[in-house]
Amino acid sequence: KKKTPCRHPAPPMDGSPAGLTCEPCEPLRRPPAARLFPGGCTIACRGHTTSGYDCGHGHLDASAPGLLRGLVLPCARKVLLLSLVAVAAARAVKPPAEGADDPIRAHWRAVVPTACATAGAALVVVLVGRALLVVGSAYRDPAAPDDAAQVSDDAAAIRRCLDRKHLYAQRLGAAIRCKTVSHDPDELSSQGPAAAVAAVASLDAELRKLHELIRRSFPRVHASLDRLVVNDWSLIYIWRANQHNERQGGGGGGAGSLPYMVYAHLDVVSAPDPEEWLVDPWSGEVKDGFIWGRGAIDDKHAVIGHLEAVEDLLEGGHTPGRDVYLCFGHDEEVGGGEGAARVAAELAARGMAFEFMLDEGLMIVDGIVPCHSRPVAMVCVGEKGYVTTRLTVASEPGHASLPPSKTAIGTLARAVSRLEQSPFPSHSGIARDMFGALAGGYDWPMALLMANLWLFAPLLARFLAAKPKTAAVVRTTTALTIFRSGAKENVLPASATAVVNHRIHPADSVKSVLRRDRHVINDPDVHMEERTKPS
């Protein structure tokens, strides 16, 4: 019951200094039914193995105390529970008659099945009971708001927006037709100076076209909000607070309230194979009830959506209770070094601080969560970090008629194949929290599993890890994105290069990912270089 600090050292995390020790263990806030197996350390105390105590917050304690807490004690609790059930069953079974052959064996032959049946029945009752309670308590309609006028205003706003949905679609389609493709500087440098100049000129022209489109489409925004252009292409719009609301504390603000920021980006990635699309990626066409094109969901829909919302509110005479900043970067797809970073520097130079920032996230999905019968709003409160590595192998060049036993391409192919065939271990903590929060909307028998993740969390992690679309929730992912080598069919290249991108699960770190990659490749001929560019 008493809080005691972890006494074992914690390995450094993401550049933190070595030699730190864990902070005092904090009790986890878990539902009453889960307190049979209480939680433990909330600080990263993980080791180099996948065994140990996983507290459900992305940390793994693989030290001796962690193994004791995560393996020995839970097993001891279960053994004790089963023993109590066995004793109770034994007391309920009539002893064998006197004179029977081998009374001990006969006694246990009667006790064991009864004990197993009793334990199994008790477990079934607990599982089904929890599932019924969760299903019965979830998705209840919220109480009606006290302010009937506010309800009426919201309903009118929704009807107004639905009436204008075709206009909204046309504006987003027009934005998609601006080919604001950002290019990696390293990629451009490999294509020569002429290609780099042409790409920059094209991006400049398309971004200016998008700026002008925004100016024409949202006249009230440009008449009422302050507009700043940062580094030629990024934009900041400032919606000043209503001074009366600020003095009176209206609109959710109040005197001295910090502003908040909504962020999106103007650029998109390229569409190298447009003929493979069902619709031209630069058409912005509305087809089958959807808007098609590059940027429709990453991330011009957010740019246009924020502006549409402000334009509509301005039309209704609304002003916010605190300042609102709309910030749009122009190079997010290549790291944001010239867009978001310059915007941040501009705001820092002005001494700005914000209550919160809303960046691009997920969406409301229907039919995406397995066996879930209702739409799910995927609220994204964080994003996986990533590390990109470049693998290089050098060898003697030569003619294809005299190939050596090992070539640069073959050596590198074996290395990337090892990485691809050795996925990172899965962790159930975050997945357990997310899918547990959705309990109540699952169909049977999935509802039974999700209401009892205290027992089935490892099964859930294994199930998610088996599918590429859900494996990212439970593990660090490995993506082989670039492989370059060779120029002619009859010449052995002097080098081969591959680029590997990892999206890091919170239970891992940059250092642990790089260390594992070196261990998996295990080839001194393969040179590994980290090339992540912080934004």
Image: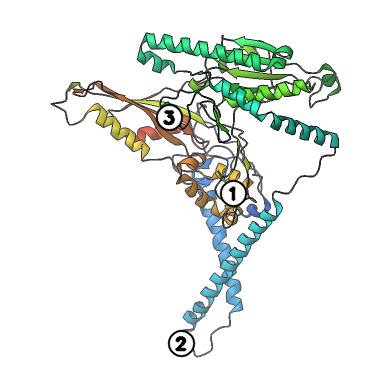
Find numbered disc 3 in the image and state the secondary structure of the residue it sits on: strand
- In this view, the residue in front, 530 or 243, is 243
Q: Which residue is mark 1?
A: 372
Q: Marks 1 and 2: which is nearer the front?
A: 1
Q: Which residue is mark 2?
A: 101
Q: Residue farthest to the bottom?
A: 99
Mark 2 belongs to which amino acid? Answer: Asp
Say which residue appears at 51% left-offset and 24% top-offset: 283
Q: Which residue is mark 3?
A: 501
Q: Residue farthest to the left?
A: 402
Q: What label does residue 449 carry, if any?
A: none
Whether residue 31 is situated above or below residue 5 in the rendered picture? below
- In this view, the residue in front, 196 or 359, is 196
Percent coordinates x, y for residue 468 in the rendering: 45, 41
Mark 1 belongs to which amino acid? Answer: His
Relative to 201, is 402 on the left or the right?
left
